[in-house]
Image (cartoon, coloured by chain):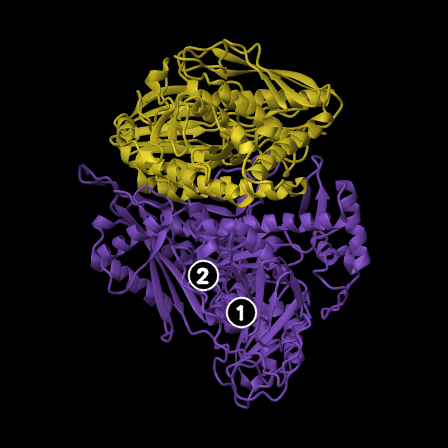
Chain colours: A purple, B yellow
Amino acid sequence: MGSAPVRLAPRHPRPLPPLPDHTRDVIQAVTHSAPGALISVGVDVGGTFTDLVAVSNDGAVRSAKVLTTPGDRAIGVARSVEHAALNAAAVARFVHGTTVVTNLLLERAGTRVVLLTSEGFTDLLWLRRQERASLYDLTRDHPEPLITRADVIGVNERVAPRWFDGHTRRDAPDGIEVLHALTDEEIERAVAQARASGATAFAVVLLHAHVFPTHEQQLARALHAACPGATIAVSHEVLPEIREYERTATTVAEAYARPAVASYMHGLSQTLAARGLPEPRVMTSAGGTLSARDAALHAASLALSGPAGGITAAAALCRGLDVGDALTIDIGGTSADVGLIVDGEPLVERGGVLAGVPIALPRVLVETVAAGGGSLARIDVGGALHAGPESAGAEPGPACYAQGGTRATVTDAHVVLGHIAAGTWSSAVTIDASRAHAALERVATSLLRSVEDAAKALIATADATMARALRRVSVERGRDPRDMVLVAFGGGGPLHACGLAEALGMWRIFIPPFAGVLSALGLALAPERRDGVSSIMQRSDLLLDHALQQARGTLVRRLRQDHDALTDRVWARVRYLGQGHELEVPLFDTDTVAHLTARFHELHLSRAGFVLDRVPEVVGLRATLEGSWWPLRVQREAREHALDFAGVDDGLALDVRCDGPCTVRLPDATLRVASGWCATSLDSGGWWIERERTA
Amino acid sequence: MTQSTSVNSANSTTRFDALGITVFAQSVAMIAEEMGVRLERAAVSPNVRERRDASCAVFDADGRMVAQAAHIPVHLGAMPESVAAVRARSPRPRDVFVLNDPAHGGSHLPDITMVEVVGHPTHSDQIIGYMAVRAHHADVGGMSPGSMPFGATELVQEGLIIPPVRIEIGGVPQDEMLALMLANVRTPQERVGDLRAQRSACAAGADSWQRLFHTHGDAWCVQAISALLDYTERTTRAALHALNGVSGTCADALEGDGVTNDAIAVVATVSVADDTLFVDLTGSSGAVAGNVNAPSAVARAAALFVLRVLLDSDDVPVNDGLARALRLTIPEDCVANAKRPSAVAAGNVELSQRLTDAMLQALGDGIRAHGLSADALPAQGQGTMNNVTLGGRGWTFYETLGGGQGASARAPGPSAVHVGMSNTRNTPVESLEWAYPMRIAAYARRWGSGGSGAHVGGDGVHRVYVPLEPVVMTLLTERRAFPPHGILGGGDGRSGENHCGARVLPAKGRWSLAAGEPLTIDTPGGGGYGRASD
């Protein structure tokens, strides 16, 4: 499977209006928009910093970084807006990334939820999937569910797949039969019990509701009538998919988080409105945006949205370079986030786990590993050197920060090797090389090696952890990393990029611009996006063409509502009968079932390496409705005279080429170009690095 | 026999730097992990892809295990014997073997192990390693659907016996061998799918292993492998060092072999000396008539698992170095040392659990008696895999059920989990009802079944099956009479129970079930830790 040659950014992409002002720092760039330009604003609220990026549709980009205000995060958001001195009247879109749901689940701080579920199956949340929390640590347990056992109400009703048609047994079930009807008396009893509980949030999850929603609908209607104003999450709406445990857990999480999301979005809307700014949109785990109102009804879809922004921006910047397939790594202080870009878009998959709660909704694939700049060196009893998983964190931080840390970190290793220059950085961090050296010396002494050897080994050890995650993420999806570009960002990304690429046999690296605020940039650029799934559960030889297209049409209409401008894309989830892992096969509105199965066989061959002489089964559909991306056209400014390049990218590093080994100081990070690699500054910002290939 | 000596004197002068040990450990772990991913993605049967009853491992030219993808502990360190059996058959590069014979590297017949012989990337007649993939196949023929028969007294009753045979010679598929295998199983289509998935996993591993040799050169790889195994041994022995002088014995029992209900003694004596763990099964029953026997590889896997738990660390990679710190003694005539023609189907799943129980308990008691703390060693868990097989016309359903884990000094015992030598996932009710003419009438936690204590044991599981057509059901369960023990005053977990309607069923047996007749399984709770009033 060869890859198309990558074309670098055109030298002078498009003429842009003259820019009246410039600074010498890409990240802190404040370029004034032409009058009348419309602006999209992305604000990413992180644990420490709140980042703002404003992208004008004429290409101007400005950013601001302020401290996060943990008490009321809306205050920090408002400050970032003030700091950026935005012209509120020109702001067309305001997109927000929030960890409010993430924190809620981590801290188990959501609303009390009462679960109504099929009698006989009220313990599903406590049974999980039966695997233990750790293979070898027999004392470790899974986190507790979000609700208590007393808050589960069993409802007498039962439906199941129908296996017999008259007296003839078939080799697959045909539809659903009602074994035990849900009576009015039972509805009344269950709803009365629910109301008497005093709870204000309810989850309704019945077996097989993904193909037979009637009983859930009846219960939900009665609950609405009995408890006006209550939060009610229903499984066939939240996640109409087979597998009762994941559907139950996700639906409960939805009810658990909804009230907090609604009140947070309401407060933020008011704060912004007072400043003349539009109603905020929110980024979902799937990397798209929802209106404040929609977000409050899709609370669980925000749970894993934290890292989605950065990958979304990376994908947009990759498209600008005609890069289709890429692996991304965002290396921070304590951890690294790995993602995958396929055909210019972040890979979106279903399923994820947060704080022990499965959230089986679409999400931008991100795998987090405990390796970062703050990962501490450790020598185990067998004499092997490890990097992490313990981290020096923000307090005390690496030894070289001189804030009290004495143990060697990966960052200290970089300082010792001269990859990170001593002195004061724009983020107000001062690097003290002597402390880094002293910390590494202790490690080197126990290893009976030189300080340099110890530093190199520590970096290689951290690289190995991250490389394994990068490889896992790609190989699990049938992708070969060697065919892809490595996109490295975050404080440590540009330092580790060459080492990681070498470990994975990759030969092209892209270091994106705006690395310090990439997540916020992704928010500003992300399109509106509505995701949905539906269930079909039919073998392909019994599925009629019109039934397939009808299911497609129904799903798209349900998602579209009045959003006419959005473009729809639909995938069918198909597997061979008996398989448990589905492949997502594109499904167009002109497709017959035969088209679909042909495409499935082809895809299976390319992913698994073989096809089976078995009937494919269509499990369900997934649809995405997407608006357009906010345009981004960035370009380094021309300078009048060519200057000597002194290893510092001041934003004006045009036409610079450097051969490794060397380092380039970026605004908030250091780029290390290893021996055998060559880095070129991109006109559109950022750097392109290629391995010099030997025959 | 193998070419490892020529590998040693190979083409490159690059030396391995011991500082890179964790980097190398990560890269070989990555190979095993990638094999596991390929297997799971491509497998057809629920047992492999949903329940992950499979393992993948990488071996060097000398047949030493270098890395294993951890899915199921019962496969832990059990595959070296498979590779040894292959190496005894004059393998050539690009040969692919399959085997399931317990006397030649197998465990029980449903576990089919595939071994690919990996050739050097440039000197293709030279062997650089072996890729092994073991998967539990849902049927390999024999007297009952699912090939986990009740009442078998000879191995031939349990299914097709496959000694190490080549299904590819030098990369050329031997279709007739495959045809012979498929003619002897009940669900040939599914077997083909799973075997292909195994083949694809082996190929992925072989490719990465060759790339490693290609990139670093032979000398570097050989040194790195030795350094990694030495490192694991060193780490293991360092942990055992503090326990020198510890000794303990535990006498436990299995509840019948499927022929009689007589208790079968399982006795483990453990001790630590010279930084080595000694495990001796002397005192255990001799081979029995029924099928709870197991080949010695299963006892070895149990001992390695207990050793790995004892290390109580995330760092230690699982490879041949771990096994070097273990000395296992098994009497010649022993239920845990099965020889032809003993039947073994249930030994792999149930004797393995009891061996683990006895070893963990003996070690925990020994450590505490020595005045040390054994925080990582819990009270006994459910000690069974609760094997349930239901077979109707043209279909077979097999699953195992979780139960209570024992409580420990650190915490209460987890509930509804697989313990000891198993760690499969459940079959979702909705998937099951969609795939088989069967319903689940109830599925719940068996509240209160964990033993009492300062930390209570974990609870078992309650599950009721109702077939929609007449079926034959086979149960291989344990801990129905002798409950899991608590420690330091903690109460015993509640024993498991099997019912058909109101009728109590024994721990093991095969029965016909009419359409609509409910089968109820209640799995055991785990033992408690410490006195409740403490």
Q: Quadrant of the N terminus of chain A?
A: bottom left
10 Å crowding of disc 1: few (<14), some (14-19), many (20+): many
Which x, y percent locates residue A613?
25, 42
The residue tagged with tag 1: helix, strand or loop? helix
Q: Quadrant of residue A672?
A: bottom right
The residue tagged with tag 2: helix, strand or loop? loop
**In the rendered picture of this protein, how many numbered marks are placed on residues?**
2
Of all chains, the one bearing label 2 is A
Residue shown at 45% from the left, 73% from the top: A629
Direction from residue B529 to residue A302 in the image, left or right? left
10 Å crowding of disc 2: few (<14), some (14-19), many (20+): many
Look at mark 1 in the image and give the residue it sits on: A522
Residue shown at 76% from the left, 47% from the top: A450
Which x, y percent locates residue A562?
37, 74
- Same chain assignment for discs 1 and 2: yes
Residue shown at 43% from the left, 53% from the top: A479
Which x, y percent locates residue A397?
74, 57
Look at mark 2 in the image and give the residue it sits on: A325
The amino acid type of the residue labelled 1 equals: Gly
Give A685 or B128, whichever is nearer the viewer.
B128
Image mark for residue A93: none
Asked if residue B247 is positioned above or below residue A511 in the image, the reply reads: above
Direction from residue B226 to residue A543 in the image, left or right? left
Q: Quadrant of residue A88?
A: bottom right
